[in-house]
Every structure is written in C-alpha cells, then in structure tokens.
Image (spheres, grey):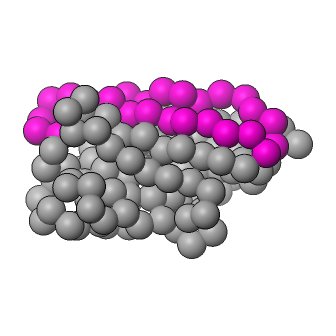
Amino acid sequence: QVQLVESGGGLVQAGGALRLSCAASGRTFSIAVMGWFRQAPGKEREFVATISSNAVNTYYTDTLKWRFTISRDNAKNTVSLHMNSLKPEDTAVYYCAASYGGGSYYTPRTEDKYDYWGQGTQVTVSS
C-alpha cells in the first residue's frame, strides 16, 4: 500500500501562487510515476501534470503548462506542484496520485493508469 498526503492548499487571490506538496510512504517512491489531478465543483476530475520516476519527463495539460510546474524529490519522497498566476477557474480539489509498473520515462495522463490516490487538498482562488 501507498499513502499519499497532500498539503499546501488554501485560499489565494487571483494572480497569486501556491505550492502543493504530496508526501508518499509505503512503497519505493523513486520507481513511481507521480501525477496531479484536480476536480472543480460540479465537474469531473481532470489531469493536471505528471512526472516520470526518473524526473526526466514531465507532461502538463495544455492550458496549464505555462503556469504550473511539477517537480519531485526522490530523497524526500515528495512531489510538488508549483502554481503561478492563479485564476478563479483553478479552484478545485487537487489530488496527488502514484502509478507503478511503467518504465522510468513513463508519464501516464489518465486516471486509470494510477494505482494510489491522496485525499486531496482544496485550492480556492478568489477574484
């Protein structure tokens, strides 16, 4: 089993920034692909970003790639999502997820490829 615990969410004004973190435990973190998803009120959960286990490959949903940055620290078993120039439409619950079984450069972008999920952290962007 893998436990994922997100932190760093909160209320921020439009144009501001937040850094989300996800701490992982339970399995070898360095072989896991890590991803971030989000779910806005009344909408389905959507892919945000992913980073390969070796941190070489990252992938973002097109509309976010210029404002969001995903990173990982395999020594600390953490993955982060830096969010800049936040907009009210970024308001959502943000989930961290882990995927095992792919190669070092694997960057899955759909929910069904992820094996473990955190409980989520709320991000609210006020206008």
Q: Residue furthest bottom?
A: 62
Q: Residue at x 33, y 29 (%)?
A: 23
Q: For residue 110, what is the image quadrant?
A: bottom left
Closest to the observer, 9 or 70: 70
Q: How many marks?
A: 0
Q: Residue at x 24, y 33 (%)?
A: 77
Which quarter of the rendering shows the C terminus?
Answer: top right
The image position of residue 118, as x and y in percent, is 38, 36
Q: Residue at x 62, y 57 (%)?
A: 67
**Residue 125, magenta (yes or no):** no
Closest to the observer, 72 or 98: 72
**Residue 22, magenta (yes or no):** yes
Instruction: Give the left or right position of residue 102, taking residue 23 as reference.
Output: left
Q: Residue furthest right?
A: 127
Which quarter of the rendering shows the N terminus?
Answer: top left
Instruction: Give the left or right position of residue 101, taking residue 123 as reference.
Output: left
Which span of residues is magenta-colored?
1-29
The image position of residue 107, as x and y in percent, is 29, 66
Residue 100 visible: yes
Residue 45 visible: no
Instruction: Give the left or right position of residue 39, taking residue 105 as reference.
Output: right
Q: For residue 30, what is the image quadrant?
A: top left
The image position of residue 114, as x and y in percent, is 28, 55
The image position of residue 90, as x and y in percent, is 69, 50
Q: Residue at x 79, y 45 (%)?
A: 15
Instruction: Give the left or right position of residue 105, taking residue 16 as reference.
Output: left
